């Protein structure tokens, strides 16, 4: 019945954990779910109020424009200017998306012919790989390894592969790792893309969720980036708007036009009222995001300390909503044991790709007092490490 593109989807690795989670809940266990990347904080009220007003505007009741309202695209361009000092032409360098996932999933259809190659990081957000496969392309994995600062090793990409690849997906600040990319890496990346005729698709939904004052950057800050790259941005994580489905892709005008062509044949744009509220969000005073960031900073501090205390190896995340801890061995087994002993649900790293094996991702998208409770319960995992060491196990 199903097409190969469905049949060939990777197996759903979390089915076992999901089932164990439900069973634990049914047994009355007070489950703390730190597996989701969906902010628990509500959308700031001034944005909600803006939507309520915009719903009454009957001009929003008709089909929206495919590329998005010019006023929204202008708000995105202004936001890039004030946030990154990047200049964008709202007319042809900005496209409105129904959440960035929608744009990422559609983008390969504009550039990939059957058999074409796309370079994808591993571990990573799974959409890069499935979207490539849906377009008939072949994903080529770039491992993100600790010894390389969790950046892809561009020199390790064989010349033949680099020559054949049409697009490369990247994501910094990175989900699931929490790593960021240096300016120097971004510069090398732009050179690599230019030399090899590769379109860079940089996914950047976490640029504002950074810690310890390490503000993160846009790939488009690099000279020449706009000739080889687009960047996906989203209101989802910056303003706690995951349910609203609004984002944008900005950069290289030819690439934007290609994605726009695909979209105009598939969807009919983002609800105008959501775009009006999105304009209000993007024009928020900076205190709005500062406040959200402070809440996350506090949670990161609590959970980072707790994970270090039980002997797990991890780096302090520079950004994002995640802590990426090395547990060794099977990440699925560790997640199962974690749930069994503590009632905490976390995501096995192998779910993000083979190079995520041995890691567990903890998300901080629960109330701060629940994160504190999780930190207390993690004590119970301490004995696991000791036992493993004593028996010389893995
Ligand atoms: C959350 C997330 C997105 C996208 O979100 P939208 O809600 O679709 O804008 C994209 N990429 C990564 C890596 C994410 O974690």
Image (spheres, rainbow, N blue to C red):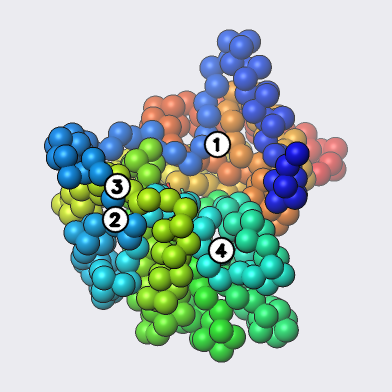
Q: Nearer the viewer, residue 244 or 356?
A: 244
Q: Nearer the viewer, mark 2 or mark 1?
A: 2
- Quadrant of the rendering where the C terminus is positioned: top right
Q: Residue furthest bottom?
A: 195
Q: Separation of disc 1 and disc 3 at Cα?
A: 36 Å
Q: Which residue is mark 4?
A: 109
Q: Separation of disc 3 and disc 4 at Cα?
A: 24 Å
**Residue under the image location 26 percent in, 62 percent down:** 73
- Looking at the image, can residue 31 be seen? yes
Tell me which corner region of the image, top left, top right, bottom left or bottom right, holds residue 159. Answer: bottom right
The local crowd at label 3, few if under 14, some if 14 to 19, many if 20 or more residues have their Cα within 10 Å, is: few
Between discs 2 and 4, the one toward the N terminus? 2
Between discs 1 and 3, the one toward the N terminus? 1
Mark linked to residue 35: 1
Q: Separation of disc 2 and disc 4 at Cα?
A: 21 Å
Disc 1 secondary structure class? loop
Coordinates of residue 384 in the picture (x, y in percent) = 72, 33
Q: Which residue is mark 2?
A: 65
Coordinates of residue 121 in the picture (x, y in percent) = 62, 63
384 relative to 124 in the view: left or right = right
The local crowd at label 1, few if under 14, some if 14 to 19, many if 20 or more residues have their Cα within 10 Å, is: some
Q: Separation of disc 3 and disc 2 at Cα?
A: 7 Å
The local crowd at label 2, few if under 14, some if 14 to 19, many if 20 or more residues have their Cα within 10 Å, is: some
Q: Could you tell me if the residues under marks 4 and 1 are in contact, i.e. CB atoms within 8 Å? A: no
Q: Nearer the viewer, residue 75 or 262?
A: 262
Between discs 2 and 1, the one toward the N terminus? 1
Q: Nearer the viewer, mark 3 or mark 4?
A: 3
Q: Nearer the viewer, residue 378 or 319?
A: 319
Q: Which residue is mark 3?
A: 63
Q: Separation of disc 4 and disc 1 at Cα?
A: 30 Å
Q: Nearer the viewer, mark 2 or mark 4?
A: 2
């Amino acid at each position: 019945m199903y097409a190969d593109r469905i049949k060939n989807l990777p197996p759903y690795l979390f089915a076992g954990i999901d089932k164990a989670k439900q069973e634990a809940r049914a047994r009355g266990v007070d489950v703390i779910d730190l597996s989701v990347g969906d902010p628990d904080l509500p959308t700031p009220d001034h944005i909600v109020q803006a939507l309520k007003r915009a719903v009454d505007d009957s001009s929003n009741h008709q089909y929206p424009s495919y590329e998005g309202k010019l006023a929204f695209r202008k708000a995105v361009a202004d936001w890039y200017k004030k946030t990154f000092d990047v200049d964008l032409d709202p007319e042809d360098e900005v496209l409105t998306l129904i959440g960035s996932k929608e744009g990422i999933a559609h983008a390969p259809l504009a550039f990939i012919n059957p058999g074409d190659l796309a370079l994808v990081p591993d571990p990573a957000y799974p959409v890069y790989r499935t979207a490539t496969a849906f377009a008939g392309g072949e994903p080529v994995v770039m491992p993100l390894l600790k010894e390389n600062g969790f950046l892809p090793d561009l020199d390790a990409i064989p010349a033949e592969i680099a020559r054949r690849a049409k697009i490369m997906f990247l994501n910094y600040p990175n989900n699931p790792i929490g790593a960021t990319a240096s300016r120097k890496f971004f510069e090398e990346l732009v050179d690599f893309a230019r030399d090899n005729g590769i379109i860079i698709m940089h996914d950047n939904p976490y640029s504002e969720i950074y810690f310890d004052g390490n503000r993160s950057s846009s790939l488009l800050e690099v000279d020449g980036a706009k000739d080889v790259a687009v960047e996906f941005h989203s209101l989802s994580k910056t303003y706690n708007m995951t349910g609203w489905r609004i984002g944008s892709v900005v950069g290289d005008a030819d690439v934007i036009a290609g994605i726009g062509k695909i979209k105009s044949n598939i969807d009919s744009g983002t609800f105008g009222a959501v775009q009006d509220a999105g304009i209000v969000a993007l024009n928020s005073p900076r205190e709005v995001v500062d406040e959200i960031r402070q809440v996350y900073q506090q949670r990161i501090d609590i959970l980072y300390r707790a994970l270090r205390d039980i002997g797990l190896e991890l780096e302090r995340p520079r950004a994002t909503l995640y802590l990426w801890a090395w547990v060794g061995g099977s990440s699925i087994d560790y997640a199962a044991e974690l749930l069994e002993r503590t009632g905490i649900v976390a995501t096995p790293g192998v779910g993000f790709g083979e190079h995520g094996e041995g890691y567990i991702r903890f998300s901080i998208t629960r109330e701060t007092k629940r994160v504190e409770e999780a930190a207390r319960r993690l004590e119970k995992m301490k004995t696991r490490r000791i036992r493993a060491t004593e028996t010389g196990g893995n």
